[in-house]
């Protein structure tokens, strides 16, 4: 188990909670599972054991937190630690000075004390109050600054680490929550963890010094002050841990509520929700989920507070009994009025300290669980890395690509996406990959870009296994447009320039790339030309059509002067004319470059020098258009099917 990870019992319960909530966010039952675990022994020994396990896990999480806060700012960390110790002693000191003052006043009233002594104590008290105020202010400043520093440091760490992670991490289903939590929740956690831990230290100091002070007055009083808060402590620990469990159990429900909320309030979904009339259905589901969540929360909050109050009344009764006893003792002169005041403030302080101990620990425990996700992300190492001695890529890559018996199965998948694929692309050749949906075409491209490594076989570039190169360097020799290309919220020039960072500000190169993609004229017509912001995040952003966005993405791919060009369905959103123009230009563009494109449109596919047909991950046919037509196989069938549809339309 991870040092600070949830104990195994909790993990099991969480898994069960997750499995009890339906996978779909849209349908299925909405009830929340009961946070009370039923399959775990509830006797005292089992409870103590659970407490010990979670306590040791939490304590083991501390050094890592200290390292994080130290990294963020050593000065602020020391400042906070110092002020904690000081503020731990201050309440005891204040109580003691108050006792001295009272005793001095009583003595003066009885005629055997001096006013000078009272003034002396009052000045000392003023000093303590001033010191308390200053140290509280300093602690607040240090805490706020440290929080900001920590948030920046951790978000920076998560971002720079995420930038190095493999595509597999992002495409895996578990990563979504991890990344979201690490960037949204985790930054604030280390400081809360540290504050809770320091709070514990402070409380412990107050507690110990108060008890010591009480012992000096009367050991019996010290014992009673120690025992009185126990009932309150027990009820706190019971309901506090339940509240935490509930929070964890309802998080899948809250996530679903967030999702439903975004479906109704986000522009991208608005068209469909309106057309299919989903609004009332989604809103009602949100309402019912919210009700179930609230009902459970209400039950727990009410019970926790009512039962908690009942238990703490016991403590209060015990405390008041003692206060009465001291009062009577003071009347008889066996204790002083100052002792009575001291006991009153000590009893309150000890009681607050006891509940503080619990809250502090519960806070640490909870923070530690969140931090676990942070460590999990920071501990994930990319698998696709450069070999110890990467082979340098030649200055001019010829672009000779060979797939040799390449197989690939996605992590967690049962069926292979590619199965023993062997084919060759000669330098400068243009190859089209065709096949039905899910045949493995995009997977082929991901492997060539080394976004995944084959599970079997190898891919050669100019005769060298691509795993021998540094993947980052390899990727500089490849330019690609993916099926799900990105629409950046930036200007037209930036949208194209991101294809080659060194050319980001080179307006001439950007314009040439735009021209190649057939979008130059459209960009020039925009209000600010290449400086027009695209996308709706901007006040004056221009909304491009789907096909225009695709041309911008193509321009981005064309900007990079790489020996290998990969286009995954480059014309899916283009009109017939634009598609024709693009392929007419592609010939010139692809000259001297190895080009691989995926397309479902056979009119464009037939122009390729070689066509590769994938079927269920296997290479089924390859050759030129004429060869494959003569073969009369799957390609010929698909081509004829599409051509017949066009012809039928033409005849009608
Ligand atoms: N990230 C992934 N994790 C698991 N399985 C995946 C992943 N991506 C794709 N697959 C599966 O791998 C198979 C091949 O997918 P791929 O995207 O390569 O198909 P394709 O030929 O490009 O399809 P299309 O024509 O629809 O774009 C599919 O069965 C798909 O379900």
Image (spheres, grey):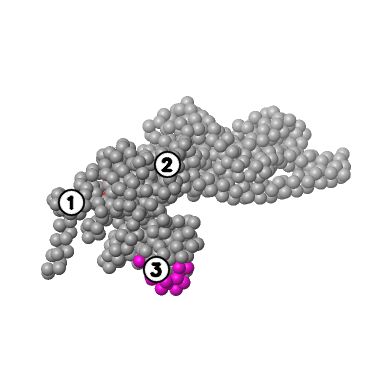
The Cα atoms of the two marked residues, 2 and 1, are separated by 35 Å
Question: How far from the left and from the top, in percent, is residue 135?
Answer: 71, 46
Q: Which residue is mark 2?
A: 469
Quadrant of the rendering where the C terminus is positioned? bottom left
Q: Which residue is mark 1?
A: 628
Kind of element beneath mark 2:
loop
Residue 306 in the image, given as x and y percentages of width and height: 50, 44
Q: From this view, report whether residue 50 is shown above or below residue 396.
A: above
Span highlighted in magenta in the image: 518-538
Contact between labelled residues 3 and 1, with CB atoms less than 8 Å apart: no
Q: Quadrant of residue 516?
A: bottom left
Q: Nearer the viewer, mark 1 or mark 3?
A: 1
Q: Work out whether residue 582 or residue 542 is closer to the camera in this orientation and state it.
A: 582
Which residue is nearer to you in this view: 229 or 424? 424
* 390 horizontally vs 456: left or right: right
Q: Name the front one of labels 2 and 3.
A: 2
Q: CA distance from mark 2 to mark 3?
A: 36 Å
Instruction: Read off the residue under disc 3.
Output: 520
Q: Residue at x 59, y 38 (%)?
A: 67
Image coords of residue 381 (percent x, y): 45, 39
Q: Identify the residue at the far left of this view.
A: 651
On whether residue 526 falls in the magenta region, the answer is yes
Q: Is residue 498 magenta?
A: no
Q: Quadrant of residue 643?
A: bottom left
Q: Secondary structure at mark 1?
A: helix
How far across and how far down the image is residue 122, in percent? 80, 46
Is 235 situated left or right of 328 in this image? left
Whichever of callouts 2 and 1 sits on the residue coming sooner in the sequence is 2
């Amino acid at each position: 188990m991870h040092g600070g990870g949830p104990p195994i019992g909790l993990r099991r319960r969480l898994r069960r909670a997750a499995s009890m909530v339906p996978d779909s966010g849209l349908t299925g039952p909405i009830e929340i599972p009961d946070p009370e675990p039923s399959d775990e022994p509830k006797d005292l020994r089992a409870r103590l054991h659970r407490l010990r396990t979670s306590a040791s896990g939490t304590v083991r999480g501390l050094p890592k937190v200290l390292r994080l806060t130290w990294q963020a700012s050593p000065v602020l960390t020391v400042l906070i630690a110092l002020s904690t110790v000081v503020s731990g002693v201050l309440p005891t000191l204040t109580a003691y000075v108050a006792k001295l003052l009272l005793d001095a006043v009583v003595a003066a009233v009885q005629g055997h004390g001096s006013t000078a002594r009272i003034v002396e104590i009052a000045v000392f008290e003023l000093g303590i109050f001033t010191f308390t105020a200053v140290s509280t202010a300093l602690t607040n400043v240090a805490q706020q600054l440290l929080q900001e520093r920590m948030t920046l440091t951790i978000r920076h760490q998560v971002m720079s680490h995420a930038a190095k992670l493999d595509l597999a991490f992002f495409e895996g289903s578990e990563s979504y929550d991890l990344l979201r939590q690490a960037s949204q929740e985790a930054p604030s956690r280390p400081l809360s963890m540290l504050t809770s831990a320091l709070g514990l230290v402070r409380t412990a100091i107050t507690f110990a010094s108060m008890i010591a002070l009480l012992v000096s007055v009367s050991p019996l009083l010290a014992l009673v002050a120690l025992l009185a808060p126990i009932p309150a402590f027990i009820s706190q620990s019971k309901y506090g841990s339940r509240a935490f469990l509930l929070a964890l159990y309802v998080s899948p429900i809250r996530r679903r509520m967030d999702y439903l909320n975004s479906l109704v309030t986000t522009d991208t979904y608005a068209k469909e929700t309106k057309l299919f009339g989903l609004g009332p259905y989604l809103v009602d589901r949100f309402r019912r989920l919210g009700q179930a969540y609230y009902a459970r929360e209400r039950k727990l909050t009410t019970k926790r507070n009512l039962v908690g109050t009942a238990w703490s009344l016991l403590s209060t009764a015990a405390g008041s009994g003692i206060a009465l006893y001291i009062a009577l003792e003071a009347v008889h002169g066996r204790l002083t009025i100052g002792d009575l005041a001291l006991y009153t403030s000590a009893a309150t302080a000890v009681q607050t300290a006891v509940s503080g101990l619990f809250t502090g620990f519960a806070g640490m425990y909870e923070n530690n669980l969140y931090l676990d996700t942070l460590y999990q992300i920071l501990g994930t190492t990319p698998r696709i890395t450069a070999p110890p001695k990467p082979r340098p890529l030649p200055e001019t890559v010829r672009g000779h690509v060979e797939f040799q018996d390449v197989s690939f199965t996605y992590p967690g998948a049962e069926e292979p996406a590619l199965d023993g694929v062997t084919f060759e692309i000669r330098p400068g050749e243009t190859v089209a990959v065709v096949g039905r949906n899910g045949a493995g075409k995009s997977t082929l491209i991901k492997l060539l870009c080394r976004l995944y490594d084959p599970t079997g076989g190898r891919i050669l570039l100019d005769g060298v296994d691509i795993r021998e190169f540094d993947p980052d360097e390899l990727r500089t020799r490849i330019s690609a447009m993916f099926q799900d290309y990105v629409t950046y919220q930036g200007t037209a020039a930036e949208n194209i320039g991101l294809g080659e960072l060194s050319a980001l500000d080179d307006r001439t190169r950007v314009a040439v790339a735009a021209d190649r993609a057939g979008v130059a004229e459209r960009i020039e017509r925009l209000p600010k030309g290449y400086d027009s912001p695209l996308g709706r995040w901007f006040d004056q952003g221009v909304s491009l059509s789907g096909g225009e966005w695709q041309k911008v993405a193509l321009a981005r791919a064309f900007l990079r002067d790489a020996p290998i060009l990969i286009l995954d369905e480059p014309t899916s959103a283009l009109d017939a004319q634009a598609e024709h123009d693009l392929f007419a230009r592609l010939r010139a563009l692809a000259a001297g470059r190895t080009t691989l494109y995926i397309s479902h449109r056979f009119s464009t596919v037939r122009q390729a020098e070689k066509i590769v047909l994938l079927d269920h991950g296997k290479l089924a046919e390859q050759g030129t258009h004429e060869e494959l037509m003569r073969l009369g196989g799957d390609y010929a069938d698909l081509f004829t099917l599409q051509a017949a549809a066009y012809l039928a339309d033409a005849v009608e």
